[in-house]
Amino acid sequence: MKKSVRKAVIAGNWKMNNTPAQTTALINEMKPLVAGADCEVVLCVPFVDIAAAVEAAKGSNIKIGAENVHFKASGAYTGEVSADMLVASGVEYVVIGHSERRQYFGETDQTVNLRSLAALNAGLKAIICVGETLEQRELGYTETLLKYQTKMALTNVTKEQLKNVIIAYEPVWAIGTGVTATADQADEGNGFVRAAIAEAYGADAAETVTVQYGGSMNAKNAEELVSKVNVDGGLIGGASLKAADFSVIVKAASEG
Ligand code: PGA
């Protein structure tokens, strides 16, 4: 199976941006621009914006995601949100293990795995982030690290559940820095992720998994990035906050 049978997924990751009112306005602006896209269009928004986002996206091709999920079903976990709560709120996707969560909030490969299992068991689609730092790249550990992070994240995930898994390869040095990986580096990194999935689940299963690139993907570089065989769309931070830029990326993925 080749790229042509994997549906590209363009997912915006708003991070800590936009109030509910701004959410409604931005989604209303985006809707006509991305209507008819030949790729999956997702916006992952802060928890407090979910209700507004779900309402604004109703009847459109935009799916709503969250930016994190806790691994327990309920209980004394102040500040956390469960997978069932997300599902009940109309959320279909969730970002897990973003490098900012790993860097600033103590996320580990183990908690990424637990969150992924919770999300998948609840029927959510999990966008699991992996990626190397500049130091790890320079030391030559990129392949080892990407394979390790991918396999750790997928521990105990069944082959059936793999259908709801998206892996986002996001080199840490490219996130929010304006420094994008070259298309070849993105393709290579995504290839390492796919190879790890193949080692764990077999080559056929690996060919069906969507592997995104993320890290300073924008309206100018998206076309070249998504043209690569292993790049099945992107996880977009900064450029997902502007309707015009985001829609250009969606268009590139629709044609890629
Ligand atoms: P960026 O963020 O596009 O602003 O680099 C990507 C991400 O963090 O997912």
Image (spheres, grey):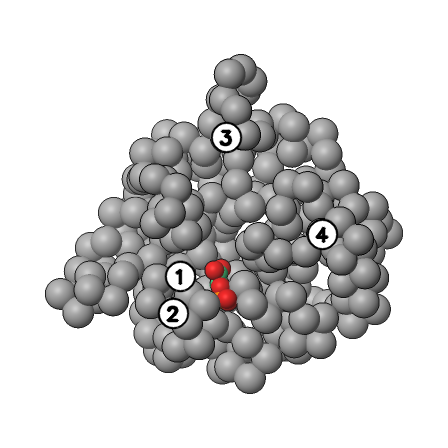
Q: Is residue 6 left or right of residue 171?
A: right
Extreme-left residue of the structure:
139
In the rendered view, would you say 134 is above or below 48? below
Reading the chain from its start, which is encountered first: label 4 or label 1?
A: 4
Give the distance between the C-alpha atoms of the residues marked 1 and 3, in whole angstroms. 22 Å
Q: Pick whichever of labels 1 and 3 is earlier in the sequence.
A: 3
Q: Where does residue 231 sit, x and y in percent of width and height?
A: 46, 68
Q: Amino acid at mark 2?
A: Ala
**Which amino acid type is shown beneath numbered disc 1?**
Glu
Q: Is mark 2 within 8 Å of ligand 1?
A: yes
Indicate if the residue with disc 3 has its beta carbon within 8 Å of ligand 1: no
Which residue is labeled 3 in the image?
A: 70
Which residue corresponds to the image point at 57% horizontal and 53% vertical from the top-left? 16
Q: Are marks 4 and 2 in contact (CB under 8 Å)?
A: no
In whole angstroms, how far apart are the C-alphas of marks 4 and 1?
26 Å
CA separation, marks 1 and 2?
Answer: 7 Å
Do the residues bearing badges 4 and 3 touch, measured as CB atoms within 8 Å? no
Residue 174 is labelled as: 2
Residue drawn at (28%, 59%), measured in percent from left and top?
Answer: 132
Secondary structure under badge 3?
Answer: loop
> Residue 170 bears which disc, if any?
1
